[in-house]
Amino acid sequence: MTVGVTQARRIGARAVACASTGNTAAALAAYAALAGLRALVIVPRGKVAFGKLAQALAYGARTLLVRGNFDECLELADQAGERLGVYLLNSVNPFRLEGQKTIMLELLQQLGWEPPEWIVLPAGNLGNTAAFGKALREACEWGLIDRLPRLAAVQAEGAAPFALSFREGFAQRHRVEPHTIATAINIGNPVSYDRAARAIRDTNGVVTTVTDDDILEAKAVVDAAGIGCEPASAAAVAGARRLVREGLIGRDARSVAILTGHVLKDPEIVSHYHRDREPPPARANRPIEIDARLEEVERVMNA
């Protein structure tokens, strides 16, 4: 996002804008505030995690809650860009993708330029998938790595237009009405489809799906490791587990799963998983109410 906002400043944009399921809105609001630019974020009402919406509000972005889904928000943002002269900073913007490439270059650098066999990532609007593929191609061309890792893009079953197209060899572009708890990837018509399809082809990659229950289970594992992630990030871990079960990723393969958002991006889902779900999931960590007596503490600790 900082690359996109820098370009907006360079061309003298009067304001920057995006449609978002939350993460892009938070980043746009933050960098626009630092750059002294007006920010407009357009989000689907009731479908954005509070931790993300709170950031957009706190950083001063003019925030519009649309009675519709993300894809309708993106159409509106695109129209606003054309008619109102605001600079659109969704991943359709090429400078955004150039900035997102740094995720992959930093990953390769941290691995000593020894690429893993697989890179697994959540897939919603497909900007990261497209950017990662471009970064890997260029890293090979520049001689930074000697082979391409395979990309595995993971979608939620309820929001999987890219996975549907992959199963047909990308012969047809699908659009769906999305429904998943992983709000960051709750997208039915991804804007970076064509570039992401190229990334999957170039890396001999795959696209798979996971259920919401798979996502929550993987999230509980990541959270309990002291790392913490939002549900969309956990889709990458759930997808890696599925691909290992299916034998596509070998159990000894060097693989990296990309976590794109931290646990406080979506605190409501944490509370729902650990406190509210019935019956409690296997990894639920229920809080325990006690009287203010040491014996009560001892009882709990000895249970």
Image (cartoon, rainbow, N blue to C red):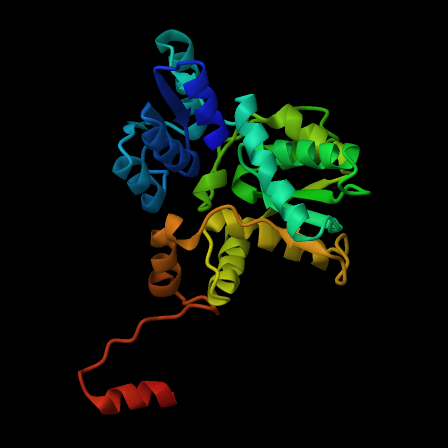
In this picture, is 128 found above or below 251? above
Instruction: Please give the name of the residue rendered at 77% of the width and 36% of the height, measured from the top-left corner.
Output: 140
Counting from the top left corner in percent of width and height, residue 87 is at 42, 17
Compared across the picture, whether 278 is left or right of 258 comes to left
Q: Quadrant of the C terminus?
A: bottom left
Counting from the top left corner in percent of width and height, residue 202 is at 76, 33
Counting from the top left corner in percent of width and height, residue 137 is at 74, 33
Q: Would you say residue 211 is visible in this rendering?
A: no
Residue at the outermost left position: 292
Residue at the outermost front position: 10
Compared across the picture, whether 244 is left or right of 218 comes to right
Instruction: Please give the name of the residue rendered at 50% of the width and 39% of the height, measured from the top-left corner.
Output: 185
Instruction: Please give the name of the residue rendered at 73% of the width and 36% of the height, measured from the top-left corner.
Output: 139
The quadrant where residue 24 appears = top left
Q: Would you say residue 270 is visible in this rendering?
A: yes
Counting from the top left corner in percent of width and height, residue 7 is at 47, 21
Please tell me which residue lies in front, 229 or 1: 1
Compared across the picture, whether 120 is left or right of 295 comes to right
In this picture, is 28 found above or below 253? above
The quadrant where residue 88 appears = top left
Instruction: Tell how many labels.
Output: 0
